[in-house]
């Protein structure tokens, strides 16, 4: 079964609600492509405006983070039922910026992934090595650990619903893209791990994205690799040129 390419934007802490609405409204024709899944993960406060602007288009809207408790005394956090209530069906979990600046561990990532699945929200679970880890030759060991812990307690039926985003930290926001061979090597390794954990059918079905300075010029080569099913895109998803990634062929 062919896996559908997913072009997912991560806006990070950019765009006000009115800017979000204007960006989607102004570019929805350019972003239309039924052959590719198009998703923008936006700041929580932008969700209502982005959802309204994307209504009736092929564009899906997701969140950038979510807490793993249902409700309560967790000032500043977003509960899964709040995303549910808006009809949000995607959420980024464990982005390296959340791991670095907000102390998210593999265990926290696992709790969030489990909670998102419980609510029928597709988690885009991020993993990725530092430059030191790559230079020391421990990339795959590190990624396997992140993915293994991230998937603890997840059934095979649920595992196939998760999207894994491989994002080498040294390539995020640096303009330094992994070569398509480097990206493929790790994405293939992740698929092999999913096969070990859940069997060949799940491994064949699960989508694995590459993220790290993806742009209109390199998307085609990256997405042509057999184990890369699209991209998680930061900087380039804030510009109309994101259409070049969507229409990479
Ligand atoms: C990201 O935010 O996940 C990302 C990959 O950013 P960029 O595309 O800007 O490197």
Image: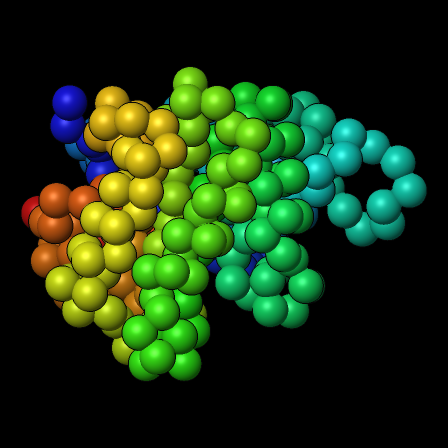
Rendered location of residue 137, percent (x, y): 31, 74
- Residue 9 or residue 127, whichever sits in front: 127
Rendered location of residue 199, percent (x, y): 29, 26
Tell me how the rendering is colored.
rainbow
- Residue 49 or residue 90, whichever sits in front: 90
User: Residue drawn at (64%, 39%), measured in percent from left and top?
Assistant: 111
**Residue 202 appears anywhere in the view:** yes
User: Residue drawn at (56%, 30%), measured in percent from left and top?
Assistant: 153
Q: Is residue 86 left or right of residue 11?
A: right
Which of the 4 quarters of the picture holds residue 73? Answer: top right
Which of the 4 quarters of the picture holds residue 140? Answer: bottom left
Residue 77 higher or lower than 218, as above or below: above
- Residue 23 or residue 249, whichever sits in front: 249
Rendered location of residue 144, percent (x, y): 40, 52
Residue 190 higher or lower than 116, as above or below: below
Q: Is residue 124 left or right of residue 1?
A: right
**Residue 13 appears anywhere in the view:** no
The residue sitting at the top extreme is 157
Residue 128 higher or lower than 148, as above or below: below
User: Residue drawn at (35%, 55%), measured in percent from left and top?
Assistant: 166
User: Residue drawn at (40%, 75%), measured in percent from left and top?
Assistant: 133
């Amino acid at each position: 079964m062919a896996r559908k390419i997913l072009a997912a934007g991560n806006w990070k802490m950019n765009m006000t609600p009115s800017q979000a609405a204007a960006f989607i409204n102004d570019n929805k024709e350019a972003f239309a492509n039924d052959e590719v899944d198009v998703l923008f993960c936006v700041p929580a406060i932008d969700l209502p405006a982005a959802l309204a602007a994307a209504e009736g288009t092929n564009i899906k809207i997701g969140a950038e983070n979510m807490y793993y408790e249902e409700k309560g005394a967790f000032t500043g956090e977003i509960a899964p039922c709040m995303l549910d209530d808006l009809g949000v069906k995607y959420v980024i979990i464990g982005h390296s910026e959340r791991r670095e600046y907000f102390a998210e561990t593999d265990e926290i990532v696992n709790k969030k992934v489990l909670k998102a699945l419980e609510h029928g929200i597709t988690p885009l679970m991020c993993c990725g090595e530092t430059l030191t880890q790559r230079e020391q030759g421990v990339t795959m060991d590190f990624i396997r650990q992140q993915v293994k812990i991230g998937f603890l307690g997840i059934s095979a039926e649920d595992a196939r619903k998760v999207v894994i985003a491989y994002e080498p930290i040294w390539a995020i926001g640096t303009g330094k893209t992994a070569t398509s061979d480097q990206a493929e090597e790790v994405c293939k390794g992740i698929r092999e791990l999913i096969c070990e954990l859940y069997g060949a059918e799940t491994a064949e079905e699960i989508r694995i994205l590459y993220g790290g300075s993806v742009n209109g010029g390199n998307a085609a080569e990256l997405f042509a690799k057999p184990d890369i099913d699209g991209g998680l895109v930061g900087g380039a998803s804030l510009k109309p040129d994101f259409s070049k990634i969507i229409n990479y062929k």
